Amino acid sequence: MYELLVTSSEGVKEFDSGIVIVGGGLAAARTAEQLRRAGYAGRLTIVSDEVHLPYDRPPLSKEVLRSEVDDVALKPREFYDEKDITLRLGSAATSLDTSAQTVTLADGTVLGYDELVIATGLVPRRIPAFPDLDGIRVLRSYDESMALRERASAAQHAVVIGAGFIGCEVAASLRGLDVGVVLVEPQPTPLASVLGEQIGELVARLHRDEGVDVRLGLGVAEVRGEGHVDTVVLTDGTELTADLVVVGIGSHPATDWLDGSGIAVDNGVVCDEAGRTSAPSVWALGDVASWRDPMGHQARVEHWSNVADQARVVVPAMLGNDVPAAVVVPYFWSDQYDVKIQCLGEPHATDIVHLVEDDGRKFLAYYERDGVLVGVVGAGMPGKVMKTRAKIAGATPISEVLE
């Protein structure tokens, strides 16, 4: 069943209980799919503030922005009809009552639940001091990507603020559209806090080779324009011409709607190792969820592949079945120009980095901590990255890997 909800004054409606999933991305779609695959036959509802079918987000900064792809839906509408999954689209969840086990939507609808899954993902950070000027964009949703694509088609000079993965991918896509790009990052290198400065410098090299003006160790002091942005002033006083500004300074978990619910939130929804939250019958997974790791630490992982791993744990736990035990090696990737940057394991910026291959564009690096291989990062070397999975899972001494 497919239902597009819009804000109305029809009043509160009550619906039968079942499993309600709040979110419109990969985590929501994978959880619903796993539930039906596991044999759950009860009422199953996905609630999303967006009007689109649950969709894949990684292409937004790449193929969608470059006009190579329009449809990024994870499943066609027929899938939800065939699996008897109700879609409540276009009305955000605004509050949660864990005592009554109800979720209230923006249009006043109240949904009862037997089990609730929080999969609301992230909200992009903005810069409040910026004036409300046309041409300043963020990127997280499909609609934002389409608006950015339209703006980029007429842009000549873009400033991308933030050289994390999203900022780097947007910069690469804009260069592919023949837009002049200045990439501004307060850290010493792109991705310094994630991959360390040594590898971050190789990423900076990649962008410079493609014609991006990479400005490091600087922030943005001011943006100017009359109705439309035309100038960006950096903290060193440099004035940059810009008809497009993209803010890519990270995101934060979408948890505001949980205020007053009693759900524990600390850099995301706090969960145990199976996705259980602090409230009975409420679960969370994906970018919004901070899961307890095997060492007893809370960790929120913003990786695409992590969602499928978590769904395979949440669903059996929710249904009262045995939870599979598996050693999961985190994995993520980022497509920039013709190079796929891949990361296996959990590298830290403070790890010892062994750069084992570098041809001036492609590279391969091993990350060492306490004498053990903990992560591998490669650019344009997919086979050599993926073959290290077992070595990372087995906590292989770095001396053996470097032999």
Image (spheres, rainbow, N blue to C red):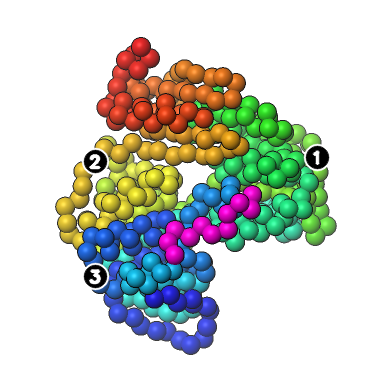
- Looking at the picture, tell me which residue is in the foreground, 232 or 91: 91
Residue nearer the viewer, 17 or 384: 384
Labels 3 and 1 touching (C-beta < 8 A): no
Residue to which mark 3 is pinned = 41
Q: Residue furthest top?
A: 403
- Secondary structure of the residue carrying numbered label 2: loop
- Residue beneath disc 2: 326
Instruction: Label 1: state its secondary structure.
Output: strand
Residue 264 is inside the magenta segment: no
Q: Position of residue 384 (x, y in %)?
A: 42, 26
Q: Foreground mark, 3 or 1? A: 3
* Amino acid identity at mark 3: Ala
Residue found at x 70% / y 34%: 212
Residue 203 point in image, percent of width and height: 58, 30
Residue at 46%, 23% in the rendered image = 365
**Mark 2 vs mark 1: in front:** 2
Q: Residues within 10 Å of mark 1 (few under 14, many from 20)?
A: some
Q: Which numbered disc, 2 or 3, marks the residue that appears first in the sequence?
A: 3
Where disc 3 sits, the SS reads loop
* Residue 180 location (% of width, % of height): 75, 40
Q: Residues within 10 Å of mark 3 (few under 14, many from 20)?
A: few
For the view shown, which residue lies furthest in the bottom direction? Answer: 10
Quadrant for residue 101, please give it. Answer: bottom left
Q: Position of residue 8 (x, y in %)?
A: 52, 83
Task: Identify the image quadrant of residue 35.
Answer: bottom left
> Would you name the residue on which mark 1 appears?
239
Q: Which residues are magenta?
A: 65-76
- How dense is the environment of label 2, judged by Cα within 10 Å: few (below 14), some, or many (20 and up)? few
The rendered magenta stretch, by its main secondary structure, is classed as loop
Task: State which quarter of the image contains the N terminus.
Answer: bottom left
How far is disc 3 from disc 1 in space, using C-alphas?
60 Å
